[in-house]
Amino acid sequence: MTTINSYLTFNGNCREAMYFYKNCLGGQLVVQTIGESPLADKMPVQMKECILHATLTNGNLVLMATDMVGEQGLQKGNGVSMAINCSSEDEVRTYYEKLAEGGRKDHILEDTFWGAVFGDLTDKYGNHWLLQYDKNAKH
C-alpha cells in the first residue's frame, strides 16, 4: 500500500515541536541528531544538536521532521497541511484541543454535511492541521 507522510522542516526547534506533537498525538518518537549521524564531521559544531531526522509513529499516523533547512532558509506558506483521519470522536476532539494549545483554532470542530466531525487549526509552530472523524466509516 502506498502512503503519503507529512515531512516538516524547522529551523532549530524540531525537537521541541516533535515532542509537542508526541504529547498531542501519542505514539513512538525516534530522533536522530546531526551529531549522531555520519554527517557530524561535515557540519558546523553549532548544528550537532539539530535534528537530522525525526519520525513520530502511532499506528498508521506517521509524521516526519528535520532541522535541515536549505540555503534559501525556512519559508512558511499555506501550501501544506497535515490531515488526520481519526478513529473516534473522542480521538478527534482530544487531538484538536492539544494541537490548538498555543495556536489558533481556525475552524472549530463541528458536525459536517458529509457526516464527519471536522475542524482545522494552526499550531503554535505555524503548521496547519485538518482533523476529521468520519461517523459513517466502518471502524
Image (spheres, helix red, strand yellow):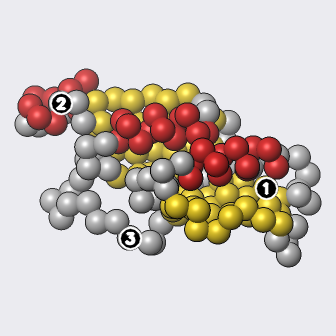
79 lies above or below 16 = below
Mark 1, secondary structure of its residue:
strand
The residue at 70%/44% (across/down) is 94
Dot 2 or dot 1: first in sequence order is 2
- Amino acid type indicated by mark 2: Lys
Q: Which residue is mark 3?
A: 77
The amino acid at mark 1 is: Tyr
How far across and down, in percent of the image, does residue 51 sit? Answer: 30, 36
- Residue 84: horizontal and vertical position, in percent? 65, 54
Left or right, residue 124 beside residue 1: left
Q: Is 100 or 67 nearer to us in this picture?
A: 100
> Callout 2 environment at 10 Å: few (<14), some (14 to 19), or many (20+)?
some
Query: At 88% across and 58% down in the image, what residue appears?
Result: 135
Disc 2 from disc 1: Cα separation: 40 Å
Q: Of 3 and 44, which appears nearest the observer?
A: 44
- On the image, the x and y values in percent for residue 46 come to 11, 34
Mark 1 packing: few (<14 Cα in 10 Å), some, or many (20+)?
many
**Mark 2 or 3, nearer chain start:** 2
In the image, residue 33 sits, relative to residue 20, either above or below, namely above
The residue under label 2 is 48
Image disc number at residue 133: 1
Q: Residue furthest bottom?
A: 113
Q: Are marks 3 and 1 in contact (CB under 8 Å)?
A: no
Q: Report x, y in % for residue 18.
A: 44, 39
The answer to whether 105 appears left or right of 85 in the picture is left
